[in-house]
Amino acid sequence: MTAAIHVERLSKTFKRYQPRRYRTLKESLINGEVFERRLSERVEAVKDISFSVSPGETFGIIGRNGAGKSTLLKLLCGILKPTSGRVVVHGRVAALLSLGVGFHEQMSGRDNVFLSGLVLGLSPREVRARFDDVVTFAELEEFIDAPVWTYSAGMRMRLAFSVAVNVDPDILVIDEVLAVGDIAFTEKCLARMREFQARGKTMLLVTHDIASIAEWCQRALWLDQGRARIIGSPADVAQAYLSEFSEAASMSAMNAVA
Ligand SMILES: Nc1ncnc2c1ncn2[C@@H]1O[C@H](COP(=O)(O)OP(=O)(O)O)[C@@H](O)[C@H]1O
Ligand SMILES: [Mg+2]
């Protein structure tokens, strides 16, 4: 069976530049240059990651802030190019990355829905056919002609989620965005995600909540400083993840006492 997503020895390094600084007159005379050389720091956001996701599988990615989860997703969606390694994806991917990414602020919600639909590979006719469902699901009937910069974070999330699920992708990628909505809307999203699973579609779920890994995923990857600590069943990943944090917690408790 062909994998829905195949990731092989994937790495991504960012260069982070320090701001330039003028030298003082004395320093420039000594060094012969007015500007200090720009120092660049390399950030290895994703390091040598390999895994495959089968069609119909829900695969989780867990890790702390800055672990490289969003970078990994962006590599999978083709938004970022790998520094080395490769990604092969079979099927149409709809991604809900961080909020509002992909929306054009000055354009109305309506125009953004059309544009996103086209970007996700639908024809104008297909977008028109799904337009009302997108707006109704997002509960944005009254606001759909207002520019997106007037939307709240919750409204953006509703629109982005609604577009992603209504374009009927083969692979749905979700980067911890559900937390932003109100409870009623989150429930609606979760129901759609269950329906998506039941139809045998593939999902990639990023979270920092180990309970949702157990609830949703067949397998998961724990990402720690860009590296894979463990890839396995939710139970194995939860055990490894929690034991690390209980150790860290008891260490800091001991330090606090000492
Ligand atoms: N465009 C970028 N330029 C430079 N560094 C980046 C960029 N994007 C992410 N990083 C860095 O890569 C690391 C991983 O970030 P990220 O993938 O956002 O982690 P997570 O989603 O797990 O919180 C962090 O150290 C972050 O600062
Ligand atoms: Mg992130």
Image (spheres, rainbow, N blue to C red):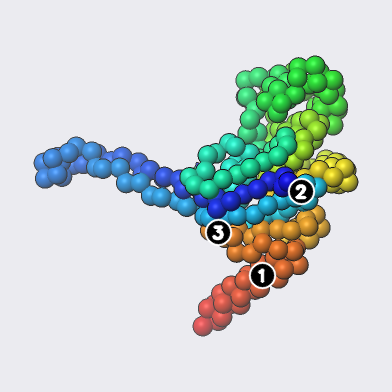
Left or right: where 94 falls relative to 42: right
Front: mark 2 or 1: 2
Which image quarter: residue 89? top right
Residue drawn at 41 percent across, 45 percent down: 16
Dot 2 crowding, Cα within 10 Å, few <14, some 14–19, many 20+: few
Q: Where is residue 64 in the image (x, y as percent from the top left)?
A: 60, 58
Name the residue beneath numbered marker 2. 1
In the rendered image, the vertical position of residue 204 relative to residue 95, given as above or below: below
Q: Position of residue 187 (x, y in %)?
A: 85, 45
Tell me the distance, in whole angstroms, between the alpha carbons under discs 2 and 1: 30 Å
Q: Which residue lies furthest to the front in this view?
A: 1
Callout 1, which amino acid? Ala
Left or right: where 67 falls relative to 184: left
- Circle nearer the N terminus (3, 2): 2
Q: How many labels does the image show?
A: 3
Q: Do the residues under discs 3 and 1 have CB atoms within 8 angstroms?
A: no
Name the residue beneath numbered marker 3. 227
- Circle nearer the N terminus (2, 1): 2
Which image quarter: residue 164? top right
Name the residue beneath numbered marker 1. 240
Q: Which residue lies furthest to the left in this view?
A: 29
Residue drawn at 55 percent across, 39 percent down: 80
